[in-house]
Amino acid sequence: MTTHPGRSILGTAITVAVAVTLGLGTPAAATTPAGTEFGVANRAEPLVDATTELIEELNDIGWPAESAYNFYPANGAPTTIVFGTPGQPTTYRNETQCATFVRRLLTHVFPSWATSSYFTTEFGASFPNSALFHDALAADRNGTNDVPKMRGFSPSFLIGLNLQPGDIMAIKYASGGSGSGHMAIIGPGSHLYDDSHPNHREWAIRVMDSTNSPHGDPGEDPAYPDTRHYYDADAHEWREGTGAGMGWMFVRTSRTTGQIVAHRWSSSSSTWYDQTARSIVFGRYDPYA
């Protein structure tokens, strides 16, 4: 693979459908059908495919020119996602924040049911923010308010990682200051990151999202980069773009229960947020829900 100045690299894992990470070591091939946790086949592949297409096509423009087609808009500004012609990157466009990114992609992939009325009825707004997504999925997980077409769940990390590409992550911030929370679509390649602590494990989670703060700095940790970082050959330094891209977040789980106890934004971040400060819940498309 050739590295081009001014262009971020997605890496080969983006095109590999890693549906399940097994055991407590490095990623392994899936031995059971995806989606068996709910007794149905995983129907989220189109969501992964569409999100990957959008990110890859925009990434092929190359930074910093990509910033004219892919960026994180100001609060209250109009949002849009445009799917153009494959192989013609400048016919694609992303102008979304994290929750509108997920919402618009769901509508693009599942137009028959992911409508404005669906989101208004089930999530409290035509374009729900991260906190509304979180609360609705948490209520579905707890069985207090079923959300059609979705399963809210807390993933088990006790033996292995049962997240799948296409799962939706919703984080709710307990206090303001940086928005209501964050949202992402889980990408391929999530795996065990650190198994050395006696009380917890750490997992690297591939996320596809739209953000103004990329996950990871290749200048600090090239093993876990973000596609929105690019190298400025003139300034001899790494710079950040915003908008749609792929990076890595990290979760810490209890060895005893397998449940998430904290997460951090990237491998280069030293700040861990516990479930009280920033609660995480996941959702999965289920046609039978």
Image: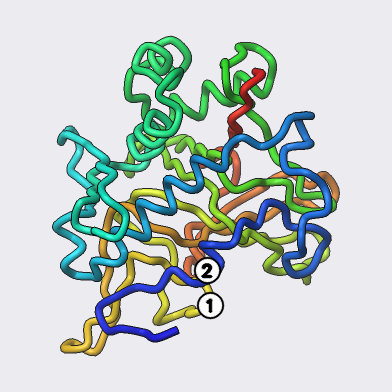
Instruction: Residue 141 in the image: state x and y as whole percent.
Output: 66, 24
Q: Residue at x 25, y 47 (%)?
A: 84
Q: Secondary structure at mark 1?
A: loop
Tag 1 near tag 2, CB within 8 Å: yes
**Foreground of the two, 141 or 271:** 141
Numbered marks: total: 2
Position of the N terminus by quadrant: bottom left
**Which color scheme is applied?**
rainbow
- Does residue 284 sit above or below 150 in this rendering? below
Toward which corner of the image does residue 272 lie, by quadrant?
bottom right
The amino acid type of the residue labelled 1 equals: Ala
**Which is closer to the viewer, label 1 or label 2?**
1
Position of residue 113 relative to residue 200, above or below, is: above
Lateral position of residue 275 relative to residue 61, left or right: right
Instruction: List the residue tagged with mark 1.
Output: 223
Q: Which residue corresponds to mark 2?
A: 267
Q: In the image, residue 213 lies at what x, y percent?
A: 33, 58
Tell me where residue 173 sits by quadrant. top left
The picture places residue 239, in percent across and down from the top left corner, at 26, 74
Give the answer, above or below, for where 74 lies relative to 24.
above
Question: Residue 246, percent across and down?
Answer: 43, 59
> In front: 200, or 132?
132
Residue at the location (78% across, 71% down)?
196
Classify residue 108 by image quadrant. Answer: top left
Marks 1/2: CA distance? 9 Å
